[in-house]
Image (cartoon, rainbow, N blue to C red):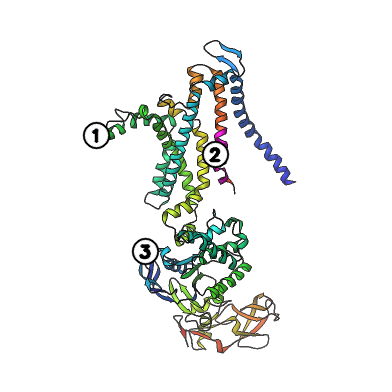
Amino acid sequence: MATQHSRSAARIMMAPAVILLLGWMLVPLIMTLFFSFKKYLPLRGGDLGWVGFENYVRFVTSSSFWPSVLTTLVIVGGVLLITVILGVLLAILLNQPMWGQGMVRILVIAPFFVMPTVSALVWKNMFMDPVNGLFAHLWKFFGASPVEWLTQVPMTSIIVIVSWQWLPFATLILLTAIQSLDGEQLEASEMDGAPPLARFAFITLPHLGRAITVVVLIQTIFLLSIFAEIFVTTQGAFGTRTLTYLIYQRVLESQNVGLGSAGGVYAIILANIVAIFLMRIVGKNLDA
Amino acid sequence: MGQIQLQQVTKSFGNVEVIPPLDLTIEDGEFTVFVGPSGCGKSTLLRLIAGLEDVTSGHIAIDGTDATTLPPAKRGLAMVFQSYALYPHMSVRKNIAFPMRMAKVSQAEQDKRIDAAAKALNLTDYLDRRPGQLSGGQRQRVAIGRAIVREPEAFLFDEPLSNLDAALRVGMRMEISELHEKLKTTMIYVTHDQVEAMTMADKIVVLQAGVIEQVGSPLELYRSPQNKFVAGFIGSPKMNFVEGAEAAKYGAHSVGFRPEHISVSTTEGTWQGTVGVAEHLGSDTYLHIHGVPGCDPMTVRASGEFTVRHGDTVFLTPDMNHIHKFDADGLRVS
């Protein structure tokens, strides 16, 4: 009796949040679907009626579609690779007892609090500027000619900027995971004759498996839609146009809402494909 | 061979000296138990022998060769931890194989040793399971299996049974004792439970605050404890100490009688007292007697049939053949 009663009470109390979330998700989704079947050019005549799948066909046959998908995947993959590898190493480092540990941990987490736009601006103007940037000065100090980061190696630059932002997140999750590792397991493996690298490979890394999965999944969700870093730095030029950025250009620069909406639907499909692959690869770590 | 020798070994954590200079020799094939209350340094001592902690000064020799600075893996010792420390993501087979894999033992030899260990420890049906799917006793056996396959010079056990329930503990106690009989390897076993120490050991080392109070066979410690600490620690229930004027009658600062060396009667005896709590175990009854001069309460063992009730008056007579006398410093006087 009590359980049934409390269950229905729980449902009623959860309802507002669920309805709000559902509306929050459904309204934009339905609007996107609605516009994707229309020829809608706000500055050139507005709503010009239904066009069926024309927008979808145009978007996917455009010469910039597949490169943008590839760019998106390269950025997501690159950032994941860098943040997970460096995150594991940093987590191990921060887990060592040292002087000023609390302070260092806060400093490491700090980049996560900087807004994407701000951090991209800081990187662009203070580090990567070929005339005044710190990197330019460094290069000159060693007698090399400064690299024009955002034009010569634009993808690398963006991956570096985004990785810098997401590294604290990965480190934080992995650090908490590493702290829960049973010290006796490490000691047991030490007694079993495992050298430090083997201890890392056979004990620490498998222990971190679940945390790495969480990092990969959460970061992928956010990285598929990165925008500010590209907007502030290259504006989608030099092969840095991701799918998100392409959609932005279609909607706002070409003022073609219908075409952009069709792109939005493709982005949803791409995200789902990536999600399915990820769950296949790393999802089993979340079981048990 | 597995003789372990400690010479003037000390250990300090910062300014805190956990183990003052200590000498101890553990002979080859001996089952040695380190016993003492919590925080007495027995686990630290074991970790020093294992090499998981560095000695602050002194020397550790294994088989006559100096091992003071050798890393744990090179000492040829295997350890069973209190938490079992199994690798959760590996199957039982892989857990047991791990030390051999690290030592680059051939696959055929690995399989042979795993099968032998699994058979000896009743783990054959569980080899493909994960540790998480096993019960506490089974995990304990896997941990022992992982130690056995290394064919070490000596086994180190760090309170291995303290996470098991009472019935399992008794069973595992027997299994470890049998294992020792079979392997004849040196074993060092740390516990705070004096029953485990008494039932398993060839030699017991009683520790208090990092100092060895007494070393001897279980019965030696039971019959002639060298001081009051050992006397009180070994034996269950605890020895009764009679102090003050009553003890002076026996020519000592305090005298001790074990509960099983005091006879109870409802009619006559040396001391008179009233029954407090009576613990009926069936085979025996432990009575807590109040009002005995110099010792309150005094615990005595009576037969299971002895029925007295709370508040009854009883008379106690100590067995003078089993009197333990101690001087003012708590040392034994004969």
Three-letter code for the amino acid on which mark 3 is drawn: Asn
Please provide percent x and percent y for residue A272.
57, 33
Three-letter code for the amino acid on which mark 2 is drawn: Leu
Residue where numbered disc 3 is placed = B15
Residue where numbered disc 1 is placed = A143
* Real-space Cα separation, disc 3 to disc 2, in angstroms: 52 Å
**Magenta residues, dominant SS class:** helix
Q: In the structure shown, which secondary structural element does the residue marked by tag 2 occupy?
A: helix
Q: Give the crowd class for mark 2: few <14, some 14-19, many >=20 residues within 10 Å.
A: some
In the shown orientation, is residue A62 left or right of residue A135? Answer: right
Tell which of B254 and A245 is nearer to you: A245
- Residue beneath the point at 71% across and 46% down: A3
Q: Magenta span has A282?
A: yes
Circles 3 and 1 on the same subunit: no
* Real-space Cα separation, disc 3 to disc 1, in angstroms: 53 Å
Q: Which residues are magenta?
A: A272-285
